[in-house]
Amino acid sequence: MRSMNPSKVHSQPFRHDLLGLRRRMLGVSQVELAERAGIGQGTLSKVEQGLREATPDMADSLAKALDCPVSFFHQVEREYGPPMSAHPAFRKKASVGQKVLDRVIAEFNVRIGHVRTLLRTVEFEPELQLPRYDIDDFSGGAEEVAANVRRAWYMPRGPVPSLTEYLERAGCLVVHCDMEAAKIDGASYRLPGLPPIIFLNRHQPADRMRFSLAHEAGHLVLHAYPTPNMEQEADVFASALLMPSSDIGPELDGLTLAKAAYMKPVWKVSMAALIVRATALKRLDKSKAEYMWRMMSMKGYRTREPASLDFAQEKPTLMDALLQNLTSEMSYSEMDLAQTLHLHYQELAQMYGLPTSTGLRRVK
């Protein structure tokens, strides 16, 4: 990446849709916001729907009530709905309220805006290509596509040391964020003018996170639009990408729980994923697989596999590099970052793991 001067954000009118976005991001109701800002709920409702203009004083009050700079409401960013890949998952989350899901989608939007802003400061040229395939062109389906992706990325045989590294080299931004309340493991966006973005729930074990990452990569490679079988296809793709049949197949013969426990840190996938893969490749017959699943349940491994087998989560580096470009290469201070990304620095520090105090000088 090569640094460039960021383009200045031109003065924009108050965006009523961004007011609603910020409110949902914080999980605040209109009633709560009206009380905090000292504005009648009817007035607030009209402002949020674009039926009434927000005065400068009203905008200041709303910004204080929502703990953000006033500039948040004057951005040029558009609002995006739920990610295509997450729609089926969202529908299944009957136990999760819409308010929680709205909060996650709002945070996705804010982070997408940050990505767009940060990319204005660099020339971003991926080392590898992220291929796109039509699954109907392959008799072997998602399994064959995954093999082609490994070839396109010049992957050596065997386990993938860091899938995050390969995806970042192929121009994907991998972002860890808090989706624990929504019970969503991952989601992805492919938007015009931006590199593909994969959001991962940071509150999941490393093996599950890797599979979620591979699953979302499958959506990016296979699915330009929603299809009835897209989730199953992404799962097959993920299994084949992380555990190629030609490499892992012989190792799955005679699979037991003890052998799965041994293989887990080597292949960096869950014991459950190894059982599923062995079954799919017919290295494990149905009765043996059923027995192993019963044992997994009896030992509580269906809920949580042994902590002694855990390995470290993969760490994305691209977002850190984009932020470091501003702070180190372009000498942005905490205040400068807040003005550029339209959130107070404390919130940015929490979102991106930034130091609480950088001591950087302010750019004049």
Image: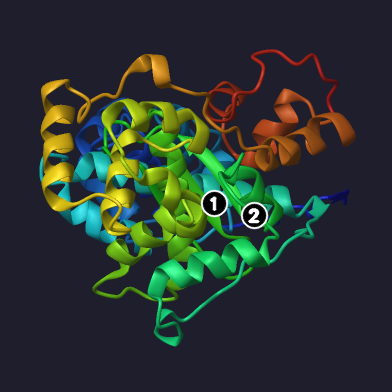
Q: Which mark is residue 116?
A: 2
Residue name at image x 14 percent, y 28 percent: 295
Mark 1 — residue?
112
Element under disc 1: helix
**Quadrant location of residue 32?**
top left
Q: Which mark is residue 17?
A: none
Crowding at mark 1 (Cα within 10 Å: few <14, some 14-19, many 20+): many
Q: What's under tag 1, amino acid-wise?
A: Ile
Question: Going by the image, does 220 lie left or right of 318?
Answer: left
Residue 50, percent from left and from top: 36, 60
* Relative to 40, residue 234 above or below: below
Question: Going by the image, does 71 lie left or right of 102?
Answer: right
Question: Looking at the image, which residue sits at the far bottom?
Answer: 137
Asked if one can make out residue 17 in the rendered structure from this viewpoint, the answer is yes
Residue name at image x 36 percent, y 27 percent: 261
How many numbered tags mark residues here? 2
Residue 289, percent from left and from top: 18, 44
Residue 209, percent from left and from top: 43, 38
Residue 128, percent from left and from top: 73, 61
Element under disc 2: helix
Q: Are marks 2 and 1 in contact (CB under 8 Å)?
A: yes
The C terminus: image quadrant: top right
| In-front residue for pair 364/277 | 277
Residue name at image x 22 percent, y 26 percent: 301
Crowding at mark 2 (Cα within 10 Å: few <14, some 14-19, many 20+): some
Q: What's under tag 2, amino acid-wise?
A: Arg
